[in-house]
Structure formats: structure tokens, C-alpha cells
Amino acid sequence: MSSMNKANDFYRSEIDGLRALAVISVIAYHAFPEIFPAGFLGVDIFFVISGFLITSVITSDLSKGKFNLLLFYSRRIKRLFPALILVIIACFAFSWFALYSKEFASLGNHIFASVGFFLNFVLWQESGYFDTKSMLKPLLHLWSLSVEIQFYIFWPLILLVTNQYKLNVLRVTFIVFSISLLLNVLFLEKDAIGAFYLSFNRFWEFQIGAMCALLIREYPSFFGRLSSKYSNYFITFAFTLLLLVVLLTPIHQTHSVVLALLITIATLSLILFSQDSMMAKKVLGNPLMVGIGIISYPLYLWHWPLISFGQIMTNGRLTPFYKFLLIFAAVVLAYLTYRCLERYLRYGSKKITIILLIILIFIASQGWSVYSRDGLSFREKHVKDSFGGRPPQVDQACLKHFEQYAPKFCRSSVDPLPVEVLLIGDSIAHNNYEGLAASYKLEGKPFAMVGWPGQKPLLMDSLGKPENESSELMHRLILGIQKDPNIKTVILAMRTSNISDSSHLLMQLNKTISEIRSYGKEIIFIHTPPEINFDPIECIGMPPFRPVLRANCSLAVNDIPDQYFQLRNQFNKLFKSMEVQTFDPYPAICQNNNCLVKFDDGNLLYREKGYLTTSGSIKVFKNFQHLIDLESHQKK
């Protein structure tokens, strides 16, 4: 009897060689997609192999009456989790020092989804596997592991039910294959990304491997004779098919059911007939290919994070030399992972399974924590603060004057003198404090700022209910200002980029200004600085690993939304009719069609999208008093 009959009874080195072929293909695609555009199909080879091996193991145990579902899952956990945990911890640790908050938040979400094994569904909602943004996702490759785990959950249960009710397992497998393939074709027409990522669109590839295992089991004599006589022909056909796919796949090729079918048919032939083929043994069974195959799983896990982090660190300009260096590093790490970790834990006791599950749950919690806490933004805040400063939110001198209003922002330049000039508004007012305080200090006028996040300096509608607590507090503050004889000047500031109904806002503003003025107060309005469309951290990097992304740290005037200028014009029209003095930071920031984000001395002008640093605020408001005096003189 041919060795084909014993397919499940001993180790097959050519399967490891096939794994090596798959992982080499994927690595080649990830490192050099323009040269190896068909390499991503290596994942399809992995799927077929998994379907073949898992089905072989389960059906063999079922036939002997000794299949244990919990034991099966325990073995899968000990096989897959150790290397996965190590790689995710390494990615988390490096990302702490290298990724910006937005990127770290995304990684945290991907960590949570990866250890929950639904990353493929998360990526489906984000973007495609083949676009440029994929390079910035160090755990992108774990989508296939999510699909595989979902198969491990689904398929043993189907086989158990099939065995219990004495159904034809080959027929059931073919039905699952047909449904999944049909769904993949239908999805490809309407949702190409879903066709690639979603597990039920990929199960047909596992089913090809499953049918391979079942055919060998059900018809051993037939396939034994076929293999002994024609194995080299089938292997030649398989390698020819693989070569044609490699040669005919165009650059920038995305998921294709036709290409996947060709690859899976070739893989089917290699699994069915490689044992009796000298050609297959020389190509797939040689020691180098077998060695790579043995470490193919940790190698698959390590290679992409290294390449992805390399692209992130070099702003997408990773050279071929460094790509080869990173691939070599991945091989070394994969070997050490297999040698020092996998070999010892794979055959451990049940305690190992429980420990691995606990560690995985802990990692999931940390991933969710990073995601829900905005990528732990405090990591980069201290970096930005060292390049321009961040104003504190409150000081005790201010709270002495205004504690009855419970402000979230409260700053004062004097204590215990009564306040003469008061700035009120939202976080933009808080943003403007440092520059205005420096200006009024030169004038010798006691100055303070009071406000709440997101709360514009407006009176409530006479018949309306307060939108929230801060709107009611702002209303009370304005009424208090009117009756305070010490306050001579009131400065209004607020964010305007989030305004949906400008006409209603202008009416409220008109009413507020008129009410305050009726008590003899001078009014000054501060326009909002233009919002930038990138994070200023990109102008200074994240020492020690992250380089500067933007050498030219500025915002083109053409990139400022039209709404910004339209609202400025509407506000200026109102203020002109009411003879209200204004200060516009725009001319101090934007000149010659560019808006500064970073000074020549290396300090930042902006700390966030629409907020100035301490040094930026002082710079912008340097000529504030002069311009206000000049405008007042012109009106007289």
C-alpha cells in the first residue's frame, strides 16, 4: 500500500515545505509588493493546509471515538497563543515610545480585536488590505489568524454534528464549500473588502483542504494508486499553476476568487500527491524549506510588525537593504520564539492553557484601555509641552474671585487686586490667556480669564432652558459681570469651527453684547485662529524612535475650510454694525499663503488642531494692545 494511506499517521515534511512556500510568498509581497504582486496569496495556501490538517485530526479521532472538543481547543491554544502573546507584547512596548496617540489608539483597538479574534471584522470597517494606510498597521496581518480561529470554532462543531447524526461528511463539506465560494463571488461584486476579510467568504479555502483530507480517508486505495503512478505529473501541474499565477498577476492586484481558486487547486495537488513525488521531496522536502516551515507561524507573526514599524519610522521610505535586514531579524526572532517558547509550551499541561488565556485576557484589557484613553495621549503631550508649553487650567488667585461660578478654566494675572479686564469663553479663551495676560501686564491692568470647555460666552435664550450646567453657569457669570463695577472690559472668545447655525449664534451674540454694553462695559471679540489639519507632534517627532514627519511645518491657506473665512466675514459684519472692537490672530499666523505651525527656533505655535502653545499665544498677541488702540483711535 502506498504511503498515501498513512497520511495521518506520521509527520509529513513536505507540508512544512508548503508552509515555507506560503510564508516566503507573504513576506516577499509585504516587503516588495511591486515585484511579487501575487505573494499575498500565500495566506490562501495556509488556509488550505489548516483545513487539511484539522480535518484529518478531528475525523481520525472521531472514527476512534476519542475526540474531545475541549482538548482540541486546548491544543490550539498552546499551539497558537504563546508566539502571538510575545509578538503583541513586543509591539505594545515599542509602540509606547514610537507611535503618536492616534496611531497608538488604533493599535490598541487592533490588539483588543486580535486577541478577541475578530480583527478581520474591524479591518473590514476601516480600509482595504491593499491600500497605503495598511503599511501603518503593525498588526494588520493578524486578520488571517482571526479567520483561522473562527474556522476552528465553527468546523469542529459541524464535524461533531455530522458524526452524531451519521451524515455524509464529504457531502456536508462540499455544501459548506459551495455556499462560502458563492458568497465570496457575490461579495466581490458589491464589497471587495468584505470579500477579502470576512471569514464566511474564506471558509471555502479551508474546505478544499478538508475535502483533501476526506478524500484520502475515504478512498485511500484509489489515491494511493493514482499517486504512485502519476504523482510527478500532478506535482508538475501544481508548480506550473503556481508559476502561472506568479507571472500573470498584475501589479496592484487585489483579492480575486479566480486567483485564489488556482492557488488552492495547486495546493490541493501538492498535498494529495507530494508524498510519492521525488520532485516535491526535492523542492518542498529539502532541509531549508522544512526548517522555514517549522518556524513559519512565528515568522509570519514577526515579519509584518518589523516591516510596518520600519515604514513608520522612515516615513514610508524603507530601503531594500533595511527590508532585507528586518526580514533577517524576523527569521532570527522566529527561530528563538520556536526554540525557547513554542517547543516547551506546546505540549504543556492544562495549567498552561489557563495561564495563556489569562494573559490573553489581560492583554485585551490593556489594548482596550489604550484605545478608550485616546492612545494614552499624555505620552506625547509632555513632548509638545517641551516645545512651546501648555497653559494650566486654573490658579488659586482666580478662584478666589470667581469660585461661585465653579469654572473649569480660571486664570488671573493679579492677586488680590480686583479684575479690570475679563476674558470669558470656551477652551479657545483658555488658549488665548497667556498672550493677553502678557499684553495687559504691560498696561498694568488686572486681567483674568473664566470659562468652561465647549461653552460659548453667550446668554441663554429668555424662554429657553439651559442646554447644560455650563450654559447656566455662563449665563450667571455674564449677569455677575454686568453688576461688577470693577470690570471695565469684557473680552469674548470661542471656537467657531463647530458652528452649524451661524444665524442663531449671531443673534445670541448680538443680544449678549448689547446686554453687557448696557452696563457701560467695553467689548472686545477675539477671532478663532485657523485650525490645522494635522497633529503638531508630526513637526517634532517622538524621541527617541520617531523622526519628524513634516520638515515644512506649515498649513497652506488653501487647505483652510471656506467656512472659516465665511464665518469671519459674518462676524466682522456684525461687529462693524455694533462698533465692537476685534482682534484677529490670522494675520499674525498666516502670511504668504502659509500658516506657521512651528517657529524658526523649533518651538511650536500650535499644540493641538485649533489651540496655541503658551509661547504661540504670546507671539500671536504680541501686538494686541497696539492694534486695539489703533482700531479705537480710527473709530474716534
Image (cartoon, rainbow, N blue to C red):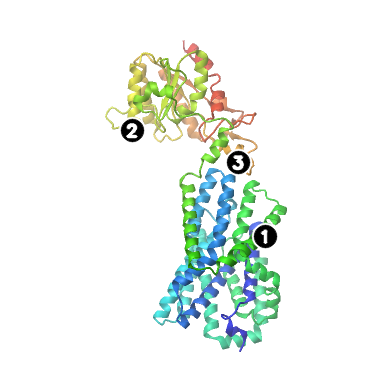
- Other residues around mark 3 within 10 Å, as few (<14) / some (14–19) / many (≥20): many
Rounded to the nearest whole Å, what is the CA distance between mark 1 and mark 2? Answer: 59 Å
Rendered location of residue 194, percent (x, y): 49, 60
Residue 332 percent across, percent down from the top left? 67, 60
* Secondary element at tag 1: helix
Choose top left, top right, bottom left or bottom right for residue 394. top left
Q: Which residue is mark 1?
A: 332
Q: In this view of the protein, which residue sits in the foreground, 104 or 570?
A: 104
Q: Amino acid at mark 2?
A: Glu
Q: Are marks 2 and 3 in contact (CB under 8 Å)?
A: no
Q: Is residue 556 above or below residue 347?
A: above
Q: Comparing marks 2 and 3, which lies closer to the viewer?
A: 3
Tell me the tag on residue 30. Answer: none
Dot placed on the residue nearer the N-terminal end, 1 or 2: 1
Q: Whole-percent x and y of residue 425?
A: 42, 27
- Of tags 1 and 2, which is closer to the observer? 1
Q: Which residue is mark 3?
A: 542
Q: Is residue 369 left or right of residue 589?
A: left
Q: Residue at x 40, y 80 (%)?
A: 164
The quadrant of the image that shows the N terminus is bottom right
Q: Give the amino acid at mark 3.
A: Met
Q: Is residue 526 above or below residue 542?
A: above
Answer left or right for 241 relative to 436.
Answer: right
Q: Earlier in the sequence, mark 2 or mark 3?
A: 2
